[in-house]
Amino acid sequence: MSLPMIRVVLGAIMIDFLQQFFASPVMQDALPPALFIAIVASSMSVMILAHRLSFLTVGISHASLAGLGLAIAFSLPLLPTATAFCVGIALLLAALPKQRGISEDTGTGLLFAGSMALGIVLISQVSRNQVDLFGLLFGNILTVTTQEWHWLLFIGCIILLAFITMARAWWSIAFDAITAAAGGLPVSLLRLLLYGTVGLSVVMCVKLAGIVLTTGLMVLPATCAWLWGRSLISLWLLSMSFAIIGTFIGLLFSYNYDWPSGATIVLTLCIMFIMSWGTAWLTQRNK
């Protein structure tokens, strides 16, 4: 078989696979929320890297187990309860470093451990039929209900509005908070709002990637973009591009091989980072 014929056959196979993918009722339900979460997470990813808040996302995502445990134990709405808890933890972490002797890392570790312990105790008291533990830990975008999708849209729009409104101010205080304060920016308030917005973003990512893998969604898109972008707008657009492509490819592999969707997306983003880093290194070397 000639090379052009092989290309035609492979192209036909790919088109057929994509038609099946888009026609699948499961993927039709999963794709919109997954891509929306990717857009929101990649936007905040830029600020998380600029402010060096990667460990904060680890702390909040693991602390969300307590919020989820409260919702399950007391039959409360799952995502709204987790949202309130995560935002509360994020704001508390923003305030803790002001107390003498408690650094931000220490405060994150304390609340991280305490909230995880509370979540484990609460979840251990309910029936196994009441909780999808694998979904909580590793995410399952395939189980998003209509009500949950509406909630994700609601908090996602709040996050994007906050990002668009305050991105330049957040960007300024990330690199020179003293000059920003001298210029009249309310640095403490802006940082408090940033932490609260990160808390909202974590809740969205938990539904897609779970408690364990949320940090990957919050960090990897901007990490890939940081190798190429220079300005805030270029980093934002690149971060979103990496996240959307990674999420789509991850869902394709998840659908084809029946892999966990969240883990597959994060793994895809990791591979994209390695490829991006390698390409950037070769580019710099050949100059």
Image (spheres, rainbow, N blue to C red):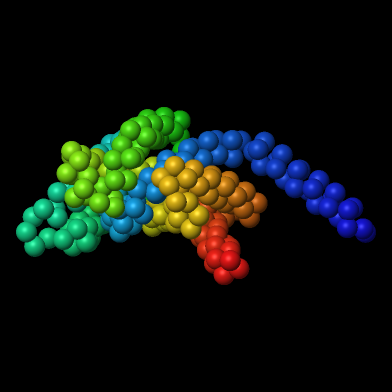
- Decide: is 278 above or below 127: below
- Decide: is 7 above or below 154: below
Residue located 92% across and 58% down the image: 2
Position in image of residue 139 (x %, y %): 44, 50
Can I make out residue 102 in this image?
Answer: yes
Q: Is residue 111 left or right of residue 285?
A: left
Quadrant in which the N terminus appears: bottom right
- Decide: is 102 above or below 252: below
Can I make out residue 122 in this image?
Answer: no
Quadrant in which the C terminus appears: bottom right
* Name of the residue lying farthest toward the front: 287
Position in image of residue 120 (x %, y %): 27, 56
Q: In the rendered image, which quarter is residue 112 located in? A: bottom left
Between residues 131 and 80, which one lies in front from this camera angle? Answer: 80
Across the whole image, how many numbered discs are drawn on residues? 0
Between residues 85 and 162, which one lies in front from this camera angle? Answer: 162
Residue located 50% across and 47% down the image: 238
Between residues 132 and 152, which one lies in front from this camera angle? Answer: 152
Q: Is residue 40 left or right of residue 68?
A: right
Position in image of residue 240 (x %, y %): 49, 44
Q: In the rendered image, which quarter is residue 105 located in? A: bottom left
- Decide: is 165 above or below 275: above
* Name of the residue lying farthest toward the right: 1
